[in-house]
Amino acid sequence: MPLSRIIAFVVLSHTAFGAARVTASLYALAQGASAFTVGVLMALFALVPMLLAMRAGRWLDAVGPWKPLATGTALMGAGVLLPAAFPYEVADIGPLLVACALTGTGFMLLQMTVQQIVGHQAAPESRAAAFSVLALGFSTSSLIGPVASGVLIDTLGHRAAFGAMFVLLAAAAALLAHHRRQLPSRHAPASAGEDKPMFELLRHREIRNVLIASGLVSMAWDLQTFMIPVYGTRVGLSASEIGLVLGSFAAATFAIRLAMPRIARTYREWQVLIFTLFTGCLAFALIPLFERLLPLAAATFLLGLGLGAAQPNVMSLIHARSPTGRVGEALGLRATIMNGSHVVLPLVFGAFGAVLGAAAVFWTMATLLGAGGTAAWRHVRAHR
């Protein structure tokens, strides 16, 4: 399947996913939900993926990309249809809860599968560049999703925004069906990895270190998606303004990923990850100091420059360091760790923010990133 078609599929499906996350939180907040309730919704995007990611990764290695892609698209479509069909005033928060679980599970399958396809199709020397192009697709959809959902909410309402997501997913399904014959075959025997312990890959030191750094970046990424709508609502921003703040983050990820092929020729993967961790630390420390649109957008832009640089390098390292025929399993392990933090993070920080305020949440994340950056810097120095 040509990379351009993969990028188009990513833009369509990830736009729907990003819009679903923002719309679900704003829909609940508009109905008077607390920060903790929003945290529960955001956690559900990751709960089922956390439980299924390892098995899904081994399934992907065994059966190839078609079935995971088709299943994931169907789950996402069903998820966004629920809140569009059942008004909050009638069904309360139930449809939103189920929608978050379905959408998160479906996107987990899509994301892992697309990452495996791109990594296997690219030559080792051009893998980082290929993942940079893929990351640009994710950045494009990250920009479109929040901004478009904010405008749709302000003009047509939350349910119409969910309906628009279903249209995007229907287009993604049509594109996938059209290129089905061009999808690669499976990358490992059906029995690969079945007799190994669930977390056996963590015994590989290089994989373990990459996954720890990836987990911190994922926590930071998820926190800005979860807390920016909460914080923006508390300081009086409209849905459109909150969408613009989130869109500023996405624009920064696009800019840094556009420059990533040139950056990759100068700096090694771990050097870029250190930049990510320290830049994220600074941005999270600054966000609670601002309450207006432009300063907040500038702070989230800085955050996007840091976090956006991480993914191409993480994915390149995972494909390079994974044992033969177990890339899907490694991606599943990464998804398990990431989604595990996504489940715990919104619940803990949602409750934390409800008691102590959003500023304490942002500064706690800044501390974690600063500690991670220091550890990574020492790791690089020790291996020089």
Image: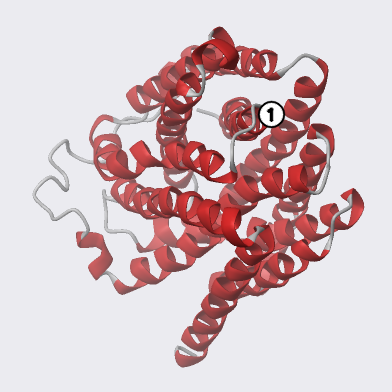
Q: Residue furthest top?
A: 85
How many callouts does the rendering have?
A: 1
The correct choice, above or below, for 173 with respect to 196 in the image is above
Residue that label 1 marks: 30
- Residue 249, position in %: x, y? 74, 50
Of residue 268 and residue 96, the one placed in the foreground of this image is 96
The correct choice, above or below, for 166 with respect to 199 in the image is above
Left or right of 146? Residue 24 is left
**Within-10-Å neighbours for mark 1: few <14, some 14–19, many 20+:** few
Of residue 134 and residue 120, the one placed in the foreground of this image is 134
Q: Residue furthest left?
A: 195
Left or right of 109? Residue 19 is right
Look at the image and tell me whether residue 312 can be seen.
no
- Residue 333, position in %: x, y? 32, 52
The correct choice, above or below, for 76 with respect to 358 in the image is above
* Res. 229 image quadrant: top right
- Residue 258, position in %: x, y? 74, 51
* Res. 246 image quadrant: top right
Residue at point 29% right, 39% down? 52
- Residue 143, position in %: x, y? 74, 38
The chosen color scheme is: secondary structure
Left or right of 307? Residue 333 is left
Residue at point 27% right, 69% down? 204
Look at the image and tell me whether residue 102 can be seen.
yes
Residue at point 78% right, 14% down? 156
Mark 1 secondary-structure assignment: helix
Q: Amino acid at mark 1?
A: Ala
Of residue 339 and residue 169, the one placed in the foreground of this image is 339
